[in-house]
Image: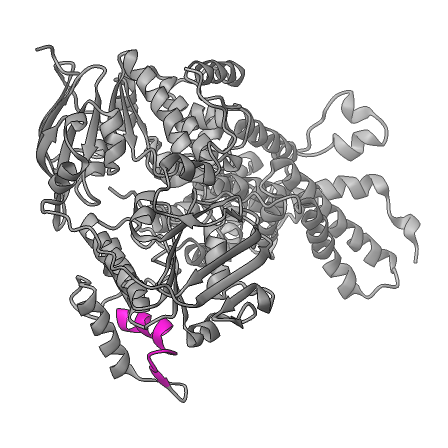
């Protein structure tokens, strides 16, 4: 066992990379759930985003266009969820599961010709001054722009929900769609926008895996990250900063346990492999025990009665 | 004559299978308190939804100050000075007062300014309210204040109030009426929807009566007797339930020192409840919703078990028995919520009859269902209680509220209970069906059963019960004889104004 092989600078830097896909997908799902929609299709939207982004990045040579395409791909798949749940008033749980299964299959089809190809590298930001600080510089300020976008998105979502009228209306729709409707708000329209936002974020998160974290395409490569993001939103009590905390905690322990495995710690690999899930859930359960503030209309189908 | 504020001319609205409003016309003058009367299903709600822009009329026109008025959505109605306080509050529990109010405004000021204005207006009209409290923690009376203040901040010319007093104690009603009178004196017109006739007689200048979607007459409430208005509403002479003089027998139900912690976060704990009910007696239990009614019912039905001695049925401890065992011993209950608690919505009436009747009506043998007997039992309920349905094979959900209520009550009454506990037996039921249900409860008592009737309808309790007690925050007041009880005394038993500050108007 050689713990000195673990480099704390690299550890934290790779922790942030590992956490970003969950963070992006989680913050998108948080917005959707705040509007009262439970979309279990996160995994499907992520993987479709992953292949859309990968394919476009490879074809155009531009990772930026890849991420744009990933957001569009994720949002496009969520449009199917919109159609099912907001137009046809189908059950949200069943529709979400269907979306995940459909997304996994669709991405495999789309990705047939992309296996074994390397995508163009995503450039890292070269932040002057900050990036030159020893230790902290390479740890925090030497990443690609999407990672910072993820953190900025958390701040923006938090501020929007807390301080703006648009955020208030979104929360109101998620709290009681009947009351919001009675006040004349367009419940369905607001929910559709929230679902599309969630889809775009999940798509970005998926592309972050295929373009940055594991720069390649393999079938089913999101490997359950979408489900983690879903669970994270619940355990974070629908609070944006807690989603960030949970994502970093999960990413951190994932990276740490990989390092520990490599260092040959005398704990069976299986225990190490399950530790991120256990610890993240445990911490967030303890945090969320104050009271569960799920949006009251979460998962309920809205049907405008006369 | 001056131009009326709002003039409705020939409004008609039909839904598939039912005409909600048929050619309704009337005028509301400036500063007039106008009552809209009618039974459930008479079309009151549809009519006000048309005025508020939630529903578009099929034909007919509205004139506001003489100009055509056809709001495409509530936003437009609010912009034209029409505000509405909803019957089922349209509030968001998880948000605070100021946020709730901001949601009802077109372009709300910054939160801090809004909070200051809320304080201002709420004090001017004698409705004190803290803008930063979470709405979920407010009492029913305070939540209504939120709605009213939300409306007042828009300087409405017409305020629509849909059954505003159904959740208030008599003292809270007084506070509300003072506020409404002040509004009227400032020139605001009020369209007041209710079926409580005495209220309308004290408050309103003019009344329009709807029956089956049609305007069947107008009157000046102060000059018309409540009985005449009721007959106008129902369309036929009302027969008040008859109370046969009856002998009270042994103590049938005895509860002593019953305390139960709240079963959920938002429930009410029951505290040290004592009550006895004798054979042939009807005990009425009043109180504002959410003061322990549901909890008391579940303790009596056996859904929540207690120490065996806390609940005694004819001297026998039953506190630790579940619902089925209690049914076998003759203690039957009919809970408030029809769909979901008293009846399984998607099951047929026969199946629903079987669900509570299996023990006493002997509808099960060796674990197998006796379908034919169950169906006969369901048919008997349908004929005896005049339940309007094509047959016992229909799902409970397909029945109208009043019909399902008759079925649910009838199902228990026909099982010949020794003690019957009912919660809100006539909630949402039209006047004639309500009278039938009350009569059946009285008949049951006349045959020697003890009845506990939990209700929020004070008139109903005064009509059928021998003794009255009120639940207030989980405590039960000492039961008193109904005869000679005044409305003020009842209000005090219900907890007065619930600690709300009295209006300083």
Magenta stretch bounds: B349-364
Front residue of B389/B75: it is: B389
* Quarter of the rendering occupied by the N terminus of chain B: top left
Q: Is residue A116 visible?
A: no
Q: How is the image coloured?
A: one colour
Q: Is residue B147 above or below residue A66?
A: above
x and y percentages locating residue B261 in the rendered image:
60, 54
Front residue of A279/B98: it is: B98
Q: Is residue B137 left or right of residue B49?
A: right
Q: Is residue B27 above or below residue A253?
A: above
Q: Is residue B447 above or below residue A254?
A: below
At 32% across and 70% down in the image, what residue appears? Answer: B352
User: Quadrant of residue B368 in the image?
Assistant: bottom left
At 47% across and 16% down in the image, what residue appears? Answer: B123
Q: Is residue B157 above or below residue B404?
A: above
Query: Is B359 inside the magenta-drawn segment?
Result: yes
Give the total number of marks visible in the rendering. Answer: 0
The residue lying furthest to the bottom in this view is B366
Q: Is residue B462 left or right of residue B96?
A: left
At 28% across and 58% down in the image, what residue appears? Answer: B405
User: Quadrant of residue A115 in the image?
Assistant: bottom right
Query: Is B404 inside the magenta-drawn segment?
Result: no
At 73% across and 45% down in the image, what residue appears? Answer: A249
x and y percentages locating residue A105 in the rendered image:
47, 60
* Quarter of the rendering occupied by the C terminus of chain B: top left
Front residue of B194/A98: it is: B194
x and y percentages locating residue B364 in the rendered image:
36, 84
């Amino acid at each position: 066992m050689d713990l000195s092989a673990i480099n704390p600078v690299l550890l934290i830097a790779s922790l942030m990379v590992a956490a970003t896909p969950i963070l992006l997908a989680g913050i998108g799902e948080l917005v959707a759930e705040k509007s009262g929609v439970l979309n279990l299709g996160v995994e499907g939207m992520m993987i479709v985003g992953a292949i859309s982004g990968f394919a476009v990045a490879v074809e155009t040579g531009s990772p930026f266009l890849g991420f744009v395409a990933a957001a569009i791909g994720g949002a496009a798949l969520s449009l199917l969820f919109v159609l099912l749940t907001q137009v046809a008033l189908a059950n949200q749980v069943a529709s979400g599961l269907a979306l995940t299964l459909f997304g996994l299959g669709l991405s495999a089809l789309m990705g047939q010709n992309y296996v074994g190809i390397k995508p163009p590298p995503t450039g890292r930001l070269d932040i002057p001054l900050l990036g030159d600080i020893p230790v902290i510089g390479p740890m925090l300020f030497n990443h690609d722009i999407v990672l910072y976008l993820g953190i900025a998105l958390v701040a923006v979502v938090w501020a929007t929900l807390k301080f703006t009228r648009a955020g208030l209306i979104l929360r109101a729709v998620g709290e009681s769609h009947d009351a919001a409707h009675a006040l004349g708000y367009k419940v369905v329209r607001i929910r559709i926008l929230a679902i599309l936002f969630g889809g775009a974020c999940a798509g970005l998160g998926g592309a972050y895996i295929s373009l940055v974290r594991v720069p390649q395409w393999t079938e089913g490569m999101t490997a359950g990250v979408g489900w983690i993001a879903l669970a994270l939103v619940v355990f974070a009590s629908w609070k944006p900063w807690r989603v960030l905390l949970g994502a970093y905690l999960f990413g951190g322990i994932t990276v740490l346990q990989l390092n520990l495995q490599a260092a040959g710690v005398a704990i069976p690999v299986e225990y190490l492999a399950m530790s991120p899930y256990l610890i993240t859930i445990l911490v967030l359960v303890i945090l969320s025990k104050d009271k569960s503030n799920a949006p009251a209309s979460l998962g309920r189908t809205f049907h405008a009665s006369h | 004559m001056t131009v009326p504020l709002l003039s409705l001319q020939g409004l008609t609205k039909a839904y598939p299978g039912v005409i909600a409003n048929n050619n309704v016309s009337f005028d509301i003058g400036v500063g007039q308190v106008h009552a809209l009367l009618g039974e459930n299903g008479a079309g009151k709600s549809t009519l006000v939804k048309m005025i508020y822009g939630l529903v578009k009329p099929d034909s007919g026109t509205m004139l506001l100050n003489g100009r055509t008025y056809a709001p495409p959505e509530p936003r437009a109605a609010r912009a034209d000075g029409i505000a509405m306080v909803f019957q089922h509050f349209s509030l968001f529990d998880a948000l605070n007062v100021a946020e709730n109010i901001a949601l009802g405004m077109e372009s709300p000021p910054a939160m801090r300014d809004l909070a200051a204005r809320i304080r201002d207006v709420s004090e001017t009209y004698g409705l004190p309210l803290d803008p930063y409290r979470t709405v979920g923690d407010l009492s029913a009376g305070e939540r209504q204040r939120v709605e009213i203040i939300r409306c007042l901040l828009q300087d409405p010319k017409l305020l629509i109030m849909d059954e505003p007093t159904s959740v208030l104690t008599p003292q809270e009603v007084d506070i509300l009426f003072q506020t409404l009178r002040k509004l009227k004196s400032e020139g605001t017109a009020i369209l007041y929807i209710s079926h409580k006739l005495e209220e309308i007689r004290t408050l309103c200048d003019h009344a329009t009566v709807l029956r089956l979607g049609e305007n069947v007459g107008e009157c000046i409430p102060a000059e018309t007797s409540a009985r005449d208005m009721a007959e106008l509403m129902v369309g036929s002479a009302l027969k008040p339930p008859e109370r046969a003089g009856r002998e009270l027998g042994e103590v049938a139900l005895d509860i002593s020192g019953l305390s139960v912690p709240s079963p959920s976060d938002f429930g009410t704990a029951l505290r040290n409840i004592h009550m006895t009910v004798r054979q042939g007696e009807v005990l009425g239990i009043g109180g504002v919703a959410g003061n322990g009614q549901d909890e008391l019912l579940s303790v009596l039905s056996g859904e929540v078990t207690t120490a065996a001695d806390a609940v005694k049925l004819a001297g026998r401890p039953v506190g630790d028995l579940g619902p089925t065992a209690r049914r076998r011993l003759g203690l039957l209950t009919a809970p408030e919520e029809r769909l979901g608690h008293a009846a399984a919505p998607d099951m047929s009436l026969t199946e629903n009859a079987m669900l509570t009747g299996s023990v006493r009506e002997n509808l099960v043998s060796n674990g197998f269902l006796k379908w034919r007997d169950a169906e006969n039992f369901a048919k008997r309920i349908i004929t005896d209680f005049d339940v309007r349905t094509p047959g016992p094979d229909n799902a409970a959900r397909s029945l109208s509220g009043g019909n399902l209520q008759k079925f649910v009550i009838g199902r228990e009454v026909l099982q010949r209970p020794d003690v019957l506990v009912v919660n809100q037996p006539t909630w949402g039921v039209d006047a004639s069906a309500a009278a039938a249900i009350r009569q059946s409860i009285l008949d049951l008592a006349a045959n020697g059963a003890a009845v506990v009737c939990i209700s929020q309808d004070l008139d109903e309790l005064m009509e059928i019960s021998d003794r009255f007690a009120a639940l207030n925050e989980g405590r039960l007041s000492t039961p008193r004889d109904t005869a000679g009880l005044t409305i003020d005394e009842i209000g005090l038993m219900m907890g007065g104004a619930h600690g709300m500050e009295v209006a300083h108007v």
